[in-house]
């Protein structure tokens, strides 16, 4: 999703806070709803939430950055998750991650300029026997190799010639 307009970010956040009766204890629920509305937490929404709940902005940011489910940046249309946990690491996860970074021209944690992909890493996807393991929008691709990266991305509309050799 692209960056949300400030006015919309503020209006929607206020509506969500109101729907919880402006209770300070509802902070996490409010943030979850804002995240599900915009697919990330726009800065203007966070400021509006802090003001309306009477909670310091620093506290809102602390909660927003603590939980992995929250994102402070717009995320891509597709989320590519690379497991870099021990079981995947020893089988070559690093090479898979580097290949993804090259092909998508984005560092881990970043989103491609066209907004199509967000590349992220996690410490375990819970299926270590399949490592190295990646997931695209929650669909697992096990026994990954750097060479298979383009094959997988092709399913999501990335032309092979986009790959960096
Ligand atoms: S370490 Fe990669 S899935 Fe568990």
Image (tube, rainbow, N blue to C red):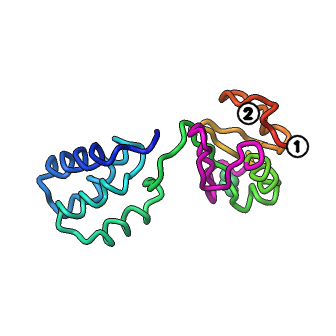
Question: What residue would you read off at disc 1?
Answer: 165
51 falls in the magenta region: no
The answer, for residue 116, to whether it is visible in the render is yes
Q: Residue at x 43, y 45 (%)?
A: 3
Residue 8 position, x and y percent, is 28, 43
- Displayed quadrant of residue 156: top right
Residue 59 position, x and y percent, is 31, 71
Question: What residue would you read off at disc 2?
Answer: 152
**Disc 1 Cβ-to-ligand 1 distance below 8 Å:** no
Residue 129 position, x and y percent, is 73, 49
Above or below, 123 relative to 78: below
- Give, as a single range, the part of the protein colored magenta: 101-129
Above or below, 68 relative to 38: below
Q: Which mark is residue 108?
A: none
- Displayed quadrant of residue 85: bottom right
Foreground residue, 23 or 45? 45
């Amino acid at each position: 999703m692209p960056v949300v307009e400030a006015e919309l970010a503020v209006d929607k956040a206020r509506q969500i806070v109101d729907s919880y009766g402006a209770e300070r204890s509802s902070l996490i629920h409010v943030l979850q709803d804002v995240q599900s509305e915009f697919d990330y937490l726009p800065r203007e929404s966070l400021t509006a939430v802090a003001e309306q709940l009477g909670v310091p902005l620093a506290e809102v940011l602390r909660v927003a950055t603590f939980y992995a489910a929250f994102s402070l940046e717009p995320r891509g249309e597709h989320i590519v998750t690379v497991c870099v946990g021990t079981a995947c690491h020893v089988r070559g996860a690093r090479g898979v991650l580097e290949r993804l970074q090259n092909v998508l021209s984005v560092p881990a944690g970043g989103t491609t300029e066209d907004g199509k992909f967000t590349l992220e890493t996690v410490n375990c996807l819970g299926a270590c026997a399949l490592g190295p393991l990646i997931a695209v929008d929650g669909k697992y691709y096990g026994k990954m190799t750097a060479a298979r990266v383009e094959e997988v991305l092709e399913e999501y509309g990335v032309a092979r010639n986009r790959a960096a050799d």
